[in-house]
Amino acid sequence: MKKISREEAIVRIEKLRELINDYRYHYHVLDESTMSEAAADSLKHELSQLEEEFPDLITPDSPTQRVAGRPLDKFQKVTHERRMISLADVFSEEEIKDWLSRNEKLLSAKERQNLEFFTDIKMDGLACAIHYDDGVLTRAVTRGDGLVGEDVTMNVRTIENVPLKLREKVQGHVEVRGEIIIFKKDFERLNELQEKKGEKPFANPRNLAAGSIRQLDPKIAASRPLKFMAYDLVSPNLPTHAEAYQALKSFGFQISEQQNVFPNIQEVFKEIKHLGETRGNLPFNTDGMVIKINNREIYDKLGIVGKTPRAAVAFKYPAEESTTKVRDIVISIGRTGAATPVAILDPVVVAGSTVTHASLHNADEIARLGVRVGDTVIIYKAGDIIPQIKEVLLTLRPDETEEFDYEKALHTQYPELEFERPAGEVVYRVKGETSDLILKRALEYFASKPALNIEGLGEKNVAALVDSKMVGSIADLYRLDARKVSQLERFADLSANNLVKAIQESKTAPLAKFITALGIRHVGAQTANSLVKKFHSLDELRGATEEDLLEIPDIGKIVAESILAYFADEDNLAMLEEMKELGVNPSFEDTSNLPLSGNSYIISGTLTDYGREEAEDLLRNLGATVTSSVTKNTTALITGEKPGKGKTDKAEKLGIPIIGEAEFLKLIGK
C-alpha cells in the first residue's frame, strides 16, 4: 500500500469506517447488499493496514475492533440499571382476555378507550442488554437473574450485526435489549461442518447461542454465527413500543420485522393465528408471540407484579417437543417396495396436533437411536409437520425390553414376502420386485372395480403410462394431458380423452372407495366403509389414534397398526398432499339414514345378475355392512349358485336367515 501522510490517513480511515459500517447496516439490518462480500473484505483489510501504521487513530468503534481479545479468567457480575424481567406466559385466547380485563380495571376510562396493542414474535435465544455512551458500545450484560447479569462485552463485540457505534448521533446513555440467536440455516451449516470433522453435532440453536456467549475465550464466540436481534429500547424512553422499534432500526440494529400495532384484541387473535401458520418459515426459531400495551406511559404505570410486567404477556404456541412411550414398531411397505419402520406411540400433543406414530426411516436409524418397544422417547415435528423421534430416555427404560430385530420383524409381519438390502443402501426392499412393477400393481388396484373403478385404466394401459414415464406415482394420474396420452401406441384421441375424463371424475369419488383404492394393507372395501362411518374425511382418518381405530367393531390390532403405519410413511403423506393440491377431494356421504343402515350381510355363491363385488357395492350404497364370515350379528346370508357349505351350516346353527337371489333383488329395490 502506498505510504500516505497522517492527515490523509485520518480522512481515509474515517471514510473507510463510514463505508464499512454502511455496508454492515444494509447487509444485516436491511437484508440488502451494497457491494460484494469480497469488496467489503478488501476495504476492511485496507482499514486494518492503515490502523496498523497509525495505531493512535484506532477507536473502540472501529470495524477492526470486532476481533476476539484474550480469554478471561471469569465473567464479572453487573447489576442491571433497570431490572430485566421476563414475561408471563399465556396459552389461549381466554387467558389473554383475562389479562386484558385485569389491566383495564387499573386504567381510567380515557386510557381504556385508546388502548393499542403492540405485537412481535418471541425469539428463542439468550437475552442480553447492550449499553452505549455517546453512541459507542461500552458494555454488554446477560439477563442473569434479572437483577444481576454477567459482563460479556468481549464476546458481544464479535457479533457482526451489533453496531459498535450507533448510526445516529446520540448524546448520553442508551440501553438496547434483545436476543442473541443463531439462524436456522447457519445452525444447519455449522452442524454439517461438525459432521465433516467427525465431531458431534450441536443439539439446538438456542443452547449453542447461549453457550457461545458464555465462553471465556472470545475466539469461540467469534467463530459462531451469532446474531443480536433487538426488541426493546430502555433509554431514551419513547411514547410507544412501535416508535422504540423504529428508533432501534435507525440506530443500526436488526429487528425481527414481525412487529405490528393493532387497535383491538380481536386483531391480535388474528395475528396469533397468522404467525402460528407462518412462523415455521421464519429464519429463526420461535415459541411464541409477545403482546404489549403499546403506550409506554400506560405500560410503566401498570407496573410489575411478582417478576413480570402487568402490561405484557407472551402467548406460547403448543410445544414442539414432548415425551411419550413406544407401544410397538411396525413396518410399512411403500409404493417403491421400501420397508419403512414406524413407531406406534401413546398419543401425545406436539405443535398443536395429536401424534400417534413416528417414522423411524430404516434399520440403521433404529440402531442409532437404540429405540425399543416400551421405551420413553422425546418426539418433535420436523418442520412442524412430520413427527420424528429425537432421543430415547434410557433411564426410563423398563427392564424387560429387548433390542428390535429388524429382519425378524419383517418375516413376522410379512411372512409371504422376501426382503433384501441392496449393497450400499440403508433400506430393505421387497426382493425381486422393481419399483415400476409395484407401481403398476398399485395403479391397477387404484383403478379397479372395488376401488375407484376408473374405466380405461386396465393392466395394459397402466403399463403403457408407466413405461412411457408419464406416470411415476399415483398422483401423476391427475396430471395427465389427453393430447400427450393420445401419442402413446395404445391410444387415440377419443380413448385418451375418455381416460383423462374418467380420472378427473374420480377426484370426488366416495371416501370409502378412495380409502380402498389406496391399497392400505388389510383394508378392503368393507373395512374402508367401517372407517368412513367413524371418520368423515381423510384428514380425520390421518389423525386417528390406535384407540380410535380399535373402537370400530371389525378392526383389530393388526389392521389398526397397518393403518397407522400407512399414514406415518412420508412417501404416502407426500403423495396424498400432492393429490390434494391437484384437486382430489373424496366425498363423504352420511349413510346412517339409508334403508339398510345397521344391517350386516354376507354373500356366498355365484349370483346370476351381478358379480360378487358389484352386489356388495349395491348393499353398501344402501348403508349395509358386508362381511366375509357369519356371526350372531349377521342380518342375513345371501346365497347364489353353489354357496359355501360352511357358511350355510353356521347360519342355520345361529338361526341367521338365508335368502336367495330373488329376495336379494327385492332388498336392493331391483
Image: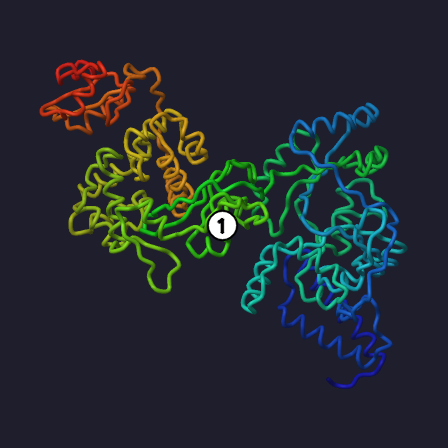
Q: Is residue 380 visible?
A: no
Task: Assign the N terminus to one quadrant of the image.
Answer: bottom right
Crowd rating for badge 1 (residues with CA inside 10 Å; few <14, some 14–19, many 20+): many
Q: Seen in the image, is 55 located left or right of residue 272?
A: right
Q: Quadrant of residue 323?
A: top right
**69 shown above or below 296:** below
Task: Assign the C terminus to one quadrant of the image.
Answer: top left
Q: Seen in the image, is 469 located left or right of residue 24?
A: left
Disc 1 marks which amino acid? Val
Which of 463 and 6 lies nearest the eye of the viewer? Answer: 463
Instruction: Name the residue rendered at 29%, 35% in the picture.
Output: 506
Instruction: Name the residue rendered at 79%, 28% in the picture.
Output: 103
Where is residue 150? Give x, y as percent: 82, 56
Where is residue 352? Give x, y as percent: 56, 37
Instruction: Name the residue rendered at 20%, 21% in the picture.
Output: 650
Where is residue 640? Give x, y as percent: 12, 22
Q: Is residue 589 visible?
A: yes
Q: Seen in the image, is 473 located left or right of residue 639?
A: right
Q: Which residue is mark 1?
A: 371
Where is residue 9? Give x, y as percent: 81, 78
Which of 435 and 602 lies nearest the eye of the viewer? Answer: 602
